[in-house]
Amino acid sequence: MPNIDTEGLALRAGHKPGLRISADTISAQDIAARYQSFGCSVALAHARVGRDRRPRVLIYVAPTAQAAIGLRAAEHHLLEPHISDRDRAFFTRELGLRLGFPTCCVDAFAARILRGSGHLHAGDRDRHDDDFVAASDGWVARPDWRLNSLLMRHRARLISFTPCRLDCPAALAQAAIILGLVHEHASATAPVLEDMLKRPLAIGPTGARAWLRRGADHQAGAGPITGTIAGAEAPRELPDGAPDPDDVAHARSWSSAEIDASGHLLGCGLPAPRLLDFAALR
């Protein structure tokens, strides 16, 4: 699937105040030049980011130089190696607001930092994948597929932030605008993107995820999946992308799991993987 620059579309249409992009050294200059050709201002920083601490170029894009520099300044503190959780939460909130993310979603993200990265509950000792924790916090029985931010590594998303809830009105307002821009500027690719985002998705505590298939006894429009699922497959970039081997292994083990009314996949370890039934609101 051709990459759809959803954030870039929103920025250029005046619906987003800024972007933060992480890139390797080779592609960073091309990305910066492309946005500058659109009339945007760009600021750069170099840092080791992510769990693997790889050296990356951080690209901050905004309508004005002052706004781009402000984004860089907001993240500067987050790149300090010994920053406290309280300061990390404060400056993460500052950066998120400058990027135009909904206040409620930014506050929820900051609260997870204060609770302890990867902790489902305050005081937990075990740490889990951050996406799993966020999905558990934001779980609703009928999540809106437009807020599916769990397929970013497969280049499928409308929003680039984690919603506080998977039916958050403020996040949905942004996603609806971006979806309209996608249909306007990338109409040929939009159906593929929507198909990926609308599939029921399970995520486990390690971050592994799988698309689930409804059983024959589940009627379309009847609400979230419960009971035994019909099968599972590892997500992949359509039409012929390669799936992650860890996702493949977990999809195999989840393929006949029982699912309760709260979306837990039973008998698949603890904490239980969680179903996000993005097909419930098709």
Image: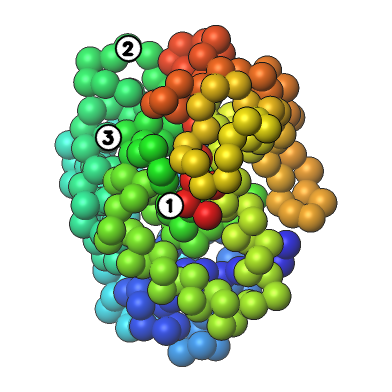
Dot 2 amino acid type: Arg
Q: Nearer the viewer, residue 37 or 161?
A: 161
Dividing the picture into quadrants, the one containing residue 60 is: bottom left
Pointer 2 with pointer 1, Cβ within 8 A: no
* Label 3, label 2: how far apart the Cα atoms are: 14 Å
Label 3: which secondary element? helix
Please tell me which residue is depicted at 74% across the width and 54% down the height of the picture: 238
Q: Amino acid at mark 1?
A: Asp
Whichever of callouts 3 and 2 sits on the residue coming sooner in the sequence is 3
Q: Mark 2 sits on what residue? A: 125
Q: Amino acid at mark 3?
A: Arg
Disc 1: which residue: 144
State the residue in front, 166 or 260.
Answer: 260
Residue placed under numbered mark 3 in the picture = 112
Vertical side of 94 occupied by 215: above or below: above
Earlier sequence position, callout 3 versus callout 1: 3
Q: Earlier in the sequence, mark 2 or mark 1?
A: 2
Q: Quadrant of residue 103?
A: bottom left
Q: Measuring 29% from the left and 14% from the top, which residue is drawn there?
A: 124
What's the CA distance linking mark 2 and mark 1? 32 Å
